[in-house]
Amino acid sequence: MTQVFSRRAELGVKLVVLGVAGVAVAALATAAAALRGSLVIGEPMPQPIPFSHKHHVGDDGLDCRYCHTTVETQAFAGMPSTRTCLGCHSQLFAQASVLAPLHESAATRRPIAWNRVHFLPQFVYFDHSIHLAKGVGCVECHGRVDQMPLTWREAPLQMQWCLDCHRDPLPHLRAPADVFTLSAPRATPQEAARLAQALGLHDTRRLTDCSTCHR
């Protein structure tokens, strides 16, 4: 049979295939490394401005909703705009060098590129508002941010961790008035049982359906 491709062409095709495969493997390795990096617990995430929840929340008493304005109404909690930050810092520490990125953002109208601390894959659906409405406080996932000079990830946010709560939510519930109070205790077992009944959490079958988190 007549050879269609020369040996040189054959070698070229093989090299191209190997190159594509190598790039794919490298991309997967990079993605895996990034994912592992995003799962580091207890390690502060560097930010363009070293924002301290300990100072703003713990010392000054800012409510979560002051900066995260859509946390009660939408899936995404929202991030503070430059205008929100300047509501205080156009007067307070306005000339501090550490706030230079804030003033640059105001001048250029480009949002500050904050680094994400809590990351979920795109195939996972999470809604902040429904968790708060069901009595799951901010502290359950985010930890005591009022004690964090720089914010770090407190919980793994992996599937098994989420399912543990979805299978037995009662130990994680708080009274609706306490969901934003980081120091508030969890509800007692009796209170949690009443909350679960009132909020429709007594039947957890829907909470563990695949379609609840994967839509």
Image (tube, grey):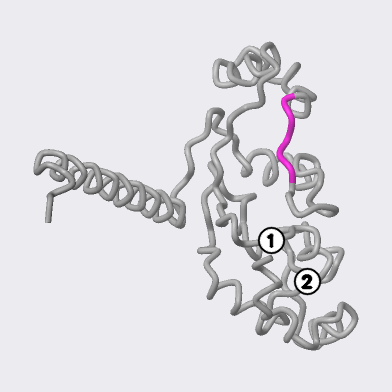
Tell me which secondary structure the magenta stretch mostly adopts.
loop
Residue 17 in the magenta stretch? The answer is no
Residue that badge 1 annotates = 126
Q: Which element carries disc 2, helix, strand or loop? A: loop
Q: Position of residue 112 (x, y in %)?
A: 62, 27
- From this view, report whether residue 9 is shown above or below residue 147: above
Disc 2/disc 1 C-alpha distance (Å): 19 Å
**Of circles 2 and 1, which is in front?**
1
Q: Residue at x 78, y 71 (%)?
A: 174
Mark 2, other Cα within 10 Å: few <14 / some 14–19 / many ≥20: many
- From this view, report whether residue 85 is shown above or below residue 122: above
Q: Residue at x 65, y 19 (%)?
A: 105
Q: Which element carries disc 1, helix, strand or loop? A: loop
Residue 165 visible at all: yes
In the shown orientation, is residue 210 left or right of residue 86?
left
The stretch in magenta equals 78-82
Residue 154: which numbered mark, if any?
A: none
- From this view, report whether residue 190 is shown above or below residue 51: below
Residue that badge 2 annotates = 174
Front-most of residues 122 and 143: 122
Residue 81 in the magenta stretch? The answer is yes
For the residue marked with disc 1, what is the amino acid?
Answer: Phe
Q: In terms of image quadrants, where is residue 98?
A: top right
